[in-house]
Amino acid sequence: MLSTFARAATRRPLTVIGLWAVFLLLGFGLGTGVFADLSDDVPDVPGTESDLADDHLSGIDPTGESVTAVVAGEAVSDAALRAQVERTVAEVRRIAGVADVPDPYTTPGLTARDGQALVIPVTFEGGLSDEAEEKATDSAVETIKRIDAPDVHVSGGELLGRQLGERAQQDVKKAELISLPVVLALLLVVFGGLRAAALPLVIAVSGIAGAFLGLFVFSQVTDISVYAIQVTTMLGLGLAVDYALLTLVRFREERRHTDDVVEAVHRTVAAAGRTVLFSGLTVAVSLTGLLVFPSVFLRSIGLAVAAVVVVDMLAAVTLLPALLVRFGGRIRPSKARSEDEEGRVFARLARFAQRRRTAVLVTVVPVLLLLALPVTGLRIAIGDARQLPATTEARQLYDTVDAHFPKGTGVSPVVVVLGPGTSAATADRIRALVPHAESRDLPGGTTVVELRPPGSVDGGAATGLVERVREIRGDEPVQVTGVAARLVDFRAMLAERAPWAALTVLAGIFVLLFAFTGSVLIPPRTITTTLLSLGAALGVVVWVFQDGHGAGLLGGEGLDALSLTAPPLIVSIAFGLAMDYEIFILARMRESLSADRRRTLAGHASSAGEEPRERSGHTAGVRAGRREAGSGLPTGSTARRHTGARRRTGDEQEAVVTGLRRSGRVVTCAALLLAVVFGAFMTGGFSPILQIGLGLTLAVLIDATVVRMLLVPATMALLGRRAWWAPRPLARAHERFGLRESAPEPPPLRAGSSPESQEADR
């Protein structure tokens, strides 16, 4: 498959580039339409009680959505201001589609006790078309905004989704303006030339276009959260740079051995392309866990992010090779370094961890577990406007109301739907749960009771009220909905489906890693070390944003709970990124083992007075080498011969050192570039994005440094030769069905050079 991509890119580079140019136009043209259709409604879970009750009310309740305005900054008793407000209320009432606008001066609770603020709620008619509701909303907002007062803010309902969509678009543009120049500067340092540094940015732009287009497609069939746009875009941008970085580093290496650019591209795709393919698959598989949840938000973002990963992967194995064919001749080869010079720091770290493997494990593992400890107290919530940046309209409205009205004003009620046949005694017990319950009758004998809880919209009092109503009702036709009820149902959904999601992801990752390595021990080792870094990162996020330690330094605040979007996204995406770096390192380890075995076969053939025939595929030595590549251990009558070969040419532990020596720089640079991208998106100030960004940044940095540079060599040293082992039936299955490409053959020996000296050049 990769050879097909390579041939297409090298034979028709202009065609490939042209097709990608059309894709970019679609992404930045059609795809940006997603910003006009973003939703702030995250916790809905189809089929739950709260969702069914809400659908029932939507069909019989004559009232529709509402928006809220607040006027503050001067005494509301001022005659001129009062005249303006009363005139405005009368004008809004006459707007087509408006159902009700109470007079704030005569309606209890709408004027602040300090006399410095008032609230104007506007309720629209039910059953309006989207166009009619949008027109009525815009007219009401425009009329209210004409009030001449220091502070006039309007938000809520469908208006809130539009406001957040506009803010999300601004934040994405800001993040791109920050991250792309910084990424370019870092790439200039890595490559030392503008041409090589610019190519990853071209792939990154393709990733952004893929994010927009993927989200737009999914927005046509499901709601897309306002938070999904930042998450999908930053991941698409980061992974595109990662894959391009890996490919370009390998291309510069191959250019040391040939002046033929097309040949260098073929060899690059055969080696790095395979790694990119498996890396993309592991990230996509990690996101399949989100598809297990019935939440529309989690499913849509899982599908959208997986689609973006596929776009990045395809760009790396098609667009980038085509660009290299056209411009790669001007990219300088990497400098030839001896084995002692190449990746000395990473080799020393690997050897240190191997020699002191027990000390490394008993030091690093407890530290990571300590960082993960706050996860035991993790709480999730829908949150209120405090999650939003201070400059957003919704946050300004919230802060103004909070400053002038009693705590809990404007908190969404727990909505209880009493169906026909509900006993009067049950209804009375439900109303008695709060001091001032409000009731209204709807067609068909349905009664709606609104219970306003103390505290926040999704705090313990609100969720406890939901659970108490569900206890009282027994078998009677009573349903509970509202924000707090949706949170209770969302938590129950997570608890029920999380084990299945974890099982799905772990099984998929195990299969992919086995297909990549042929080992049954490397997958569980990789999963265990990855979970350590993931737990540590999530623990720090809980400590900062839930407990409030240092959240202000990042532009947020402690909210006593994490956004319900953050934990599932951090876990799924960070797990995939960690697998990404593991694949980078394992690829170099396998390549080192393969090189050792090629030299061994060449040595056997030379000692027998024969030319090496490793490419013919007809000798017993080649068949033995293939069996060994599949199982990681020698099999049958070749066992003793290959055991001796390892002692002479380098064993599995030296392959670990070589793998880190050759991949450590790429992994570290990739992690740093991803951290830059995530950090740029955190400048927007949305608390869920701050939480997700911090979690992913920490997970990537911890995994790329502590885990991959210390725990990987230490655990591989503990496993020893068993690391690459698989039972014989699985080894045969891997040999026959393993998803693998042949590593590129070494270039022909230059005159007067030995295999050892040429391998040192590589």
Image: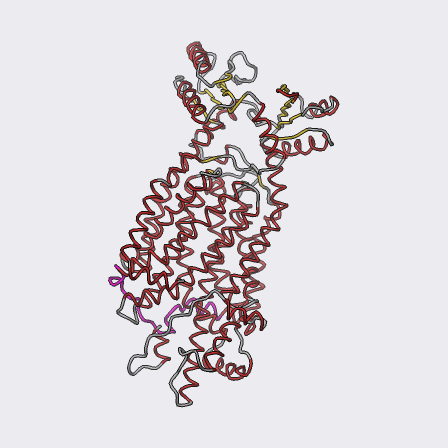
- What range of the chain is rendered magenta? 326-351
155 w.r.t. 1: above or below: above
The residue sitting at the left extreme is 330
Answer with left or right where residue 284 lies relative to residue 246: right
Q: Position of residue 436 (x, y in %)?
A: 65, 20
407 w.r.t. 218: above or below: above
The quadrant the C terminus occupies is bottom left
Which residue corresponds to the image point at 43% horizontal and 56% vertical from the top-left? 671
The residue sitting at the bottom extreme is 609
Q: Position of residue 496 (x, y in %)?
A: 63, 45
Answer with left or right where residue 495 lies relative to residue 658: right
Most foreground residue, 716 or 601: 601
Answer with left or right where residue 675 lies relative to residue 498: left
Q: How many marks?
A: 0
580 w.r.t. 121: above or below: below
Where residue 28 sits, quadrant-wise, is top left
Where residue 728 sits, quadrant-wise, is bottom right
Residue 332: in magenta span: yes
